[in-house]
Image (cartoon, grey):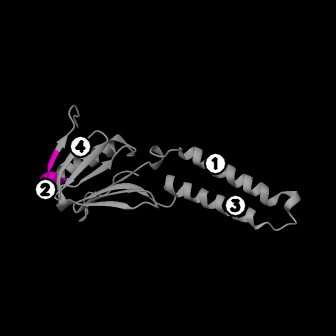
Amino acid sequence: MAASGSSNARSSLIVQLSPTRSAKLSFSVQLVLALFWIAWAGTLLFAQDTAGQPNYFYYVFFGLAVVFLGYVVLQNTSVFGVQSYIEVTRQYIVQKFGVFRTKHIIPIPDIKAVHISPLALRVTLLDESKVYLDLKQVRKKKDLEKIKIEIRDLASEHNFSVTEAAGYNA
């Protein structure tokens, strides 16, 4: 999904993230494991020698396999809409890493400073706490630059300082 919105009243930049880039197992490996699990559970459930015996453990095993497949699809695709994203508006910055994870919301008026590095934003709030926004999962370099440009624009509008990593020329 590309960036959206720039002319409406609530100007917003939404950039989709790729959760599979930070996963311990890639999406394809998770998908193969889920499909193998379903095949194995189906074989156990519908095998000739157990057809006459109702074994509820096999039904539970098959149900868990289907639930795991649903989880993998939800976390790693946008079949059900964008689930992992960074949104930058005039009022806040939001980072969400998936369906079952919490949103990290940073109100713009609470920002004291932002340090921009090639693949991260380090935000210092007015209470001196720091928030690290990981940008490694942004799919396109163009979207990464849009986020950084939007942060620079917000800095001039809301009077917070922006610094950049040495050797990084955007």
Left-right relation of 113 to 60: left
Q: Residue 142: image x %, image y %?
A: 32, 42
Left-right relation of 140 to 146: right
Label 3 vs 1, first from the N-terminus: 1
Left-right relation of 51 to 103: right
- Image mark for residue 33: 1
The Cα–Cα distance between marks 3 and 1, rounded to whole angstroms, is 14 Å
Question: Which residue is rendered at x = 78% and y = 60% of the image?
Answer: 45
Whether residue 110 is visible: yes
Whether residue 77 is visible: no
Q: Nearer the viewer, residue 16 or 58?
A: 58
Q: Which residue is the extreme one toward the left?
A: 159
Label 1 vs 2, first from the N-terminus: 1
Single out the mark in the foreground, 1 or 2: 1
Q: Residues within 10 Å of mark 4 (few under 14, many from 20)?
A: many
* Residue 71 sits inside the magenta stretch: no
* Range shown magenta: 154-162
The Cα–Cα distance between marks 3 and 2, rounded to whole angstroms, is 56 Å
Q: Residue 166: image x %, image y %?
A: 20, 33
* Residue hosting label 2: 157
- The three-letter code of the residue at mark 4 reads Ile
Q: Quick check: marks 4 and 2 in contact, CB under 8 Å?
A: no
